[in-house]
Image (cartoon, rainbow, N blue to C red):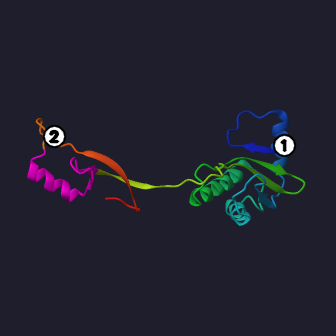
Amino acid sequence: RPKINRKQGRLTKEEKKAETLAGTVIVKSVSAPNSTVLPTAALADAGRQSGLVGGKFVPETVQHCAAQVDQWYRRAGYLANSVTGATLDADAGVVKLEVDEATVSSHPVDIVCVKEVAIDDRTGETMSPSAMRRKLMLEGGADSDGSVSFNTTIVETKGKTK
């Protein structure tokens, strides 16, 4: 089975012979058997746009197809996924792309928005920025070195914070 890897080094005699055979086979389709997220339509488009489908199994078209698939992954938000190699089934004319796809935990992740707010030393209540400014103006809240300090805490917010 002819195989092209992205990190290709020196070829053995067997690999050179397979590569010569690969250059004579017309590719009929592209698949990614170990993919769980890549749609068949995206693979077919990548194969057509790269010239791999209908063309020969040569490094340039395979790499162009891999770049098309990698671009689909990025657009779809799968930043950790990529094509790592390709194998040709010469009898069927099918290129099988080898892909690395990140797996996600079955436990969902909750994202919570928070912001830091000042706490009134006397009451223990959180203060708005305007209340902080008033307190500073009324009490002249600067330390001896001219710095201003407040006790703060983190509070949950609904979406964006200023």
The structure residue drawn at horizontal position 73% and vertical position 54%, both measured from the top left corner, is 35
Specify whether 125 is left or right of 108: left
- Which of the two residues, 44 or 114, is positioned nearer the viewer here? 114
As measured in the structure, the alpha-carbon distance from the residue carrying label 1 to the one carrying label 2 is 74 Å
Magenta stretch: includes residue 120:
yes
Q: What span is in magenta?
A: 118-141
Relative to 50, 152 lies left or right: left
Quarter of the figure with the C terminus: bottom left
Q: What's the residue at 24%, 58% (across, down)?
A: 128
Q: Quadrant of the N terminus?
A: top right
- The label nearer to you, 1 versus 2, is 2
Q: Residue at x 19, y 59 (%)?
A: 130
Q: Which residue is drawn at the image coordinates 68% and 61% (left, top)?
A: 46
Residue that badge 1 annotates: 18
Circle count: 2
Residue found farthest to the front: 123
Numbered disc 1: secondary structure: helix
Residue matched to label 2: 147
Frontmost residue, 56 versus 135: 135
Give whichever of discs 1 and 2 has the lower sequence position.
1
Amino acid type, callout 1: Ala
Instruction: Answer with the quarter of the image where residue 28 lies.
Output: bottom right
Q: Is residue 125 magenta?
A: yes
On the image, the x and y values in percent for residue 33 come to 78, 54
- Within 10 Å of disc 2 (Cα), the crowding (few <14, some 14-19, many 20+) is few
Q: Is mark 2 on a helix, strand or loop?
A: loop
Of 40 and 94, nearer the camera is 40
Image position, residue 68 (x, y; %): 64, 57
Quarter holding residue 14:
top right
Q: Which amino acid does label 2 sit on?
A: Ser
Image location (x, y in percent) of residue 111: 49, 55
> Disc 1, disc 2: CB below 8 Å?
no
